[in-house]
Image (spheres, rainbow, N blue to C red):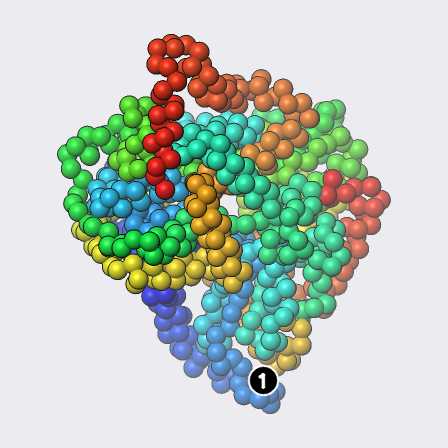
């Protein structure tokens, strides 16, 4: 391939103004990433008019910086406050928050920053070298493939839970049920909307995640504190040790690959990638029971994967003109305003924009890594704040965050409702993770499956005869049957193993 | 949290405010006559534009372009607030209940008044009578396209194919669905609709050959059409569209199907005349700016800057035509 446009792209990025816009973008992105609710989409929308006046390349470099900068920032609240700002960081909460409670928040954030940097960079290299090839791969994924992937995802959800399998399945079913709320996109029929226009478009991810994770944790802690003296969480090391890095190495490598590949798929790619990366690590681990209680790999894998996915989600936009998510739609809009139509011709018509944006991501990722190192120390100090002060502030952030998504007071009540639900779930030993993830995957499975059947003319055999969906479904069967297969095969270790792990799991709240 | 949240907006207001202050002094003298002895000079505060869709869609981008211009003309800030939900009906209900003082206005879609009522219960349908229309804005036309490999070049080619055509739409109750359903039914082509959640997935499915044809807004497909990856089969406007001058209308091909999306600026019912005049003047000035014209071109939008009466007439006749045609061909959009 001709390498000179790529090098020219670096020239563009290294112009001082563009470097500055890149820096401004990643700083804004990191800050808004910390705030749940106010996502990169809303921020880019607010900043859009400012970009009218600046050079197209600089504008897009800044907006892209906001997008991937937010991915870095989002980790911070997930780890420290158990508030996942996006569906793709839900999985990070499990081990990240557990590490923070053990006084190892610095380790979690440090690993996440390194993983994000590696994942992002690997993905940019992939973008530079493989963009056109991978774009074609994205098009091979039609509704049947998404349906199959979604089913695999739900199966992985039940595998990543750490408690009782049955309870995880029940929680996942509730999540699937909540996903059906709203006006049916195929027939316009109202489902569980109780004549409320607020429910017509279904329930948003943010109020559910904020309530089930953030608010429920606070409610639960208030009760805990009545029973025992609760000291502020101790804050130990600030940077991950050599041992931690060694442990996370493999997870970061595999997470980069998984994230890059799944991130190319428009729609649920980022969520699936974080989920898949986590599940792979847990499967590979010698002691899978460490997961959910502060395994370093449990933070490294999903954080690496979701950053890699965020980067590769630029591929459909830059090469096909398809915005993969809401934020990409805004960047699409910003490019249009600048007189640039993203699509197959972008790379030849506007090589400066194409390569400028891609190369700015190399720089942006380095800037983010450099910024993260001192920031970790600062943010970790949040945990030193007394719970009596931290808890109300967190509640305020949570409620405001939920409000900013749609500017509806209704969503605040939703958060409170889900907060109470999350509290009750915790009391009865249910985990919120499976519910939230199943909720995210539920609508994807339903609409993809129904679209597939329309395409197949009602014949479900089509799922099996298409090569990709057929393969994915075969994997589903293998994963589902794996416990049985394993039981049937060696028979060396008697029933003690599952019984033992069950006992350990029940001890943790 | 509140600190971070307001920073960008405050910066923005500062920028807008500064430019607005200059424009205000420039054109203030000309316009005071039009306020017609009302109580105080409108506007004295921010004018909030609400959008019944998420940030990034056509309605959102149009609102932002318009809000920026109107805010500048009137010398106030014009923040844009996204209130997505129920296809824009949620935002409409809120606007309807707002005080009719011109400080809360919204760009709304024709389809919410002409097509959505065909798919929801009568109580839920939004009625244009509940709003004051200030001005028409622009048209956003639909194009039916197929992938280059399919070999189809016109609607008749689809007919000759002699198989069930699977077509992607941008969702139930959208103009894309209505236009395709009417075309296939009147051409006697066997077809199955595959609804997607918006234009991007419908385009993806078409590029990946998951469906035979897709109907989407021109702005969504134009780049792939120009690149030769998609072949346009028909547009659904009365006349050919300047952005795709070689594409025949459905009518030219012998099918009486005209479906179009257009947008207009609305205020709550009972907004004072002088306020409406001020807004209309500011909108007209915005329409005339080169930046706004360029915005229309880049988004493949056709100006439709018509009077409120004409907007009402268009809505009425479209509603009647759609209903009649659906009845004639026995089509139900909610399948």
Give the quadrant of the C terminus of chain A.
Answer: top left
Q: Is residue A273 visible?
A: no
- Which residue is found at the position 67% from the left and 69% from the top? B131
* Residue B275: x %, y % from top left: 59, 79
- Which residue is found at the position 64% from the left and 80% from the top? B273
Within 10 Å of disc 1 (Cα), the crowding (few <14, some 14-19, many 20+) is: some
Q: Nearer the viewer, residue A199 or B27?
A: A199
Q: Chain of mark 1?
A: B
- Which residue is found at the position 53% from the left and 27% from the top? A148
- Which residue is found at the position 24% from the left and 55% from the top? A232
Q: Nearer the viewer, residue A181 or A104?
A: A104
Locate residue A253 relative to residue B283 in the image: left or right.
Answer: left
* Residue A385: x %, y % from top left: 25, 59
Q: Quadrant of residue B163?
A: top right
Locate residue B80 relative to residue A27 in the image: left or right.
Answer: right
Q: Nearer the viewer, residue A478 or A271?
A: A478
Please tell me whether mark 1 sits on a helix, a strand or a loop.
helix
Q: Is residue B36 visible?
A: yes
Q: Nearer the viewer, residue A22 or A457?
A: A457
Give the quadrant of the N terminus of chain A.
Answer: top left
* Residue B120: x %, y % from top left: 72, 52
Locate residue B114 relative to residue A167 in the image: left or right.
Answer: right
Q: Which residue is mark 1?
A: B35
Classify B57 as above or below A291.
below
């Amino acid at each position: 391939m001709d390498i000179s446009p790529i090098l020219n792209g670096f020239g563009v990025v290294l112009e001082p103004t563009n470097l500055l816009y890149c820096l401004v973008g990643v700083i804004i992105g990191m800050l808004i990433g910390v705030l749940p609710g106010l996502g990169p989409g809303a921020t880019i929308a607010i900043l859009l008019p400012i970009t009218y006046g600046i050079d197209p390349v600089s504008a897009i470099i800044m907006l892209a910086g906001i997008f991937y900068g937010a991915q870095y920032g989002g980790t911070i609240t997930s780890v420290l406050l158990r508030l996942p700002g996006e569906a793709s960081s839900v999985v990070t909460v499990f081990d990240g928050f557990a590490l923070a409670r053990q006084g190892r928040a610095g380790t979690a954030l440090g690993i996440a920053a390194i993983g994000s940097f590696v994942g992002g960079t690997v993905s940019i290299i992939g973008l530079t070298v493989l963009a056109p090839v991978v774009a074609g791969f994205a098009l091979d994924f039609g509704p049947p493939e998404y349906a199959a992937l979604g089913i695999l995802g739900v199966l992985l959800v039940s595998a990543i839970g750490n408690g009782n399998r049955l309870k995880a399945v029940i929680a996942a079913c509730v999540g699937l049920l909540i996903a059906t709320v709203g006006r049916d996109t195929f027939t316009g029929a109202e489902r569980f909307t109780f004549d409320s226009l607020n429910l017509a478009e279904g329930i948003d991810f943010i109020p559910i995640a904020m309530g089930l994770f953030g608010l429920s944790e606070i409610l639960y802690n208030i009760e805990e504190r009545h029973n025992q003296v609760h000291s502020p969480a101790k804050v130990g090391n600030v940077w991950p040790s050599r041992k931690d890095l060694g442990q996370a190495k493999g997870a970061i490598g595999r997470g980069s690959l998984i994230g890059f590949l799944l991130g190319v798929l428009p729609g649920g790619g980022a969520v699936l990638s974080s989920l898949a990366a986590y599940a792979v690590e847990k499967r590979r681990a010698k002691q899978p029971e460490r997961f959910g209680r502060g395994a370093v790999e449990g933070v490294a894998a999903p954080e690496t994967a979701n950053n890699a996915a965020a980067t590769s989600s630029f591929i459909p936009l830059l090469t096909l003109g398809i915005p993969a998510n809401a934020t990409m739609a805004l960047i699409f809009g910003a490019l249009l305003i600048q007189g640039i139509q993203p699509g197959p011709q972008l790379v030849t018509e506007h090589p400066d924009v194409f390569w400028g944006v891609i190369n700015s991501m190399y720089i942006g990722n380095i800037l983010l890594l450099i910024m993260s190192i001192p920031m970790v120390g600062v943010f970790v100090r949040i945990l030193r704040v007394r719970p009596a002060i931290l808890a109300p502030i967190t509640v305020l952030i949570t409620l405001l965050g939920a409000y900013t998504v749609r500017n509806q007071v209704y969503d605040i009540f939703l958060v409170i409702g889900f907060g109470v639900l999350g509290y009750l779930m915790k009391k009865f030993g249910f985990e919120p993770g499976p519910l939230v993830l199943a909720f995210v995957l539920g609508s994807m499975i339903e609409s993809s499956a129904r679209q597939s059947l329309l395409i197949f003319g009602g014949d479900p055999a089509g799922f099996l005869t298409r090569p990709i969906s057929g393969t994915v479904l075969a994997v589903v069967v293998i994963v589902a049957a794996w416990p049985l297969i394993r039981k049937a095969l060696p028979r060396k270790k008697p029933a003690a193993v599952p019984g033992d792990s069950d006992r350990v799991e029940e001890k943790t709240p | 949290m509140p600190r971070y949240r307001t920073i960008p907006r405050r910066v923005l207001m500062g920028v807008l405010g500064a430019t607005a202050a200059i424009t205000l002094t420039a054109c203030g003298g000309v316009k005071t006559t039009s306020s017609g002895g009302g109580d105080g000079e409108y506007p004295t505060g921010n004018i909030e534009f609400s959008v019944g869709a998420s940030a990034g869609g056509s309605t959102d981008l149009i609102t932002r372009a318009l809000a920026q211009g109107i805010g500048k003309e009137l010398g106030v800030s014009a923040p844009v607030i996204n209130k997505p939900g129920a296809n824009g009906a949620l935002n409409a209900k809120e606007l309807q209940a707002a005080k009719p003082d011109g400080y809360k206005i919204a760009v709304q879609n024709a389809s919410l008044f002409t097509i959505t009522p065909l798919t929801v219960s009568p109580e839920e349908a939004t009625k244009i009578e509940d709003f004051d229309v200030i001005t028409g804005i622009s048209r956003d036309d639909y194009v039916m396209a197929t992938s280059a490999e399919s070999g189809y070049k016109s609607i008749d080619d689809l007919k000759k194919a002699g198989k069930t055509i699977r077509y992607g739409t941008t969702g139930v109750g959208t103009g894309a669905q209505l236009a395709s359903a009417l075309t296939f039914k009147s051409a006697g082509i066997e077809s199955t609709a595959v609804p997607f959640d918006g234009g991007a997935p419908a385009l993806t499915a078409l590029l990946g050959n998951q469906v035979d044809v897709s109907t989407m807004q021109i702005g969504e497909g134009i780049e792939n059409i120009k690149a030769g990856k998609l072949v346009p089969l028909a547009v659904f406007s009365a006349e050919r569209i300047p952005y795709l001058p070689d594409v025949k209308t459905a009518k030219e091909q012998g099918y009486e199907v005209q479906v179009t999306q257009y947008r207009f600026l609305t205020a709550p019912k009972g907004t004072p005349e002088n306020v409406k005049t001020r807004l209309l003047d500011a909108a007209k000035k915005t329409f005339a700016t080169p930046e706004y014209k360029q915005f229309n071109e880049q988004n493949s939008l056709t100006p439709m800057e018509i009077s409120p009466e004409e907007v009402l007439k268009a809505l009425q006749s479209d509603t009647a035509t759609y209903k009649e045609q659906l009845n004639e061909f026995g089509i139900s959009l909610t399948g």
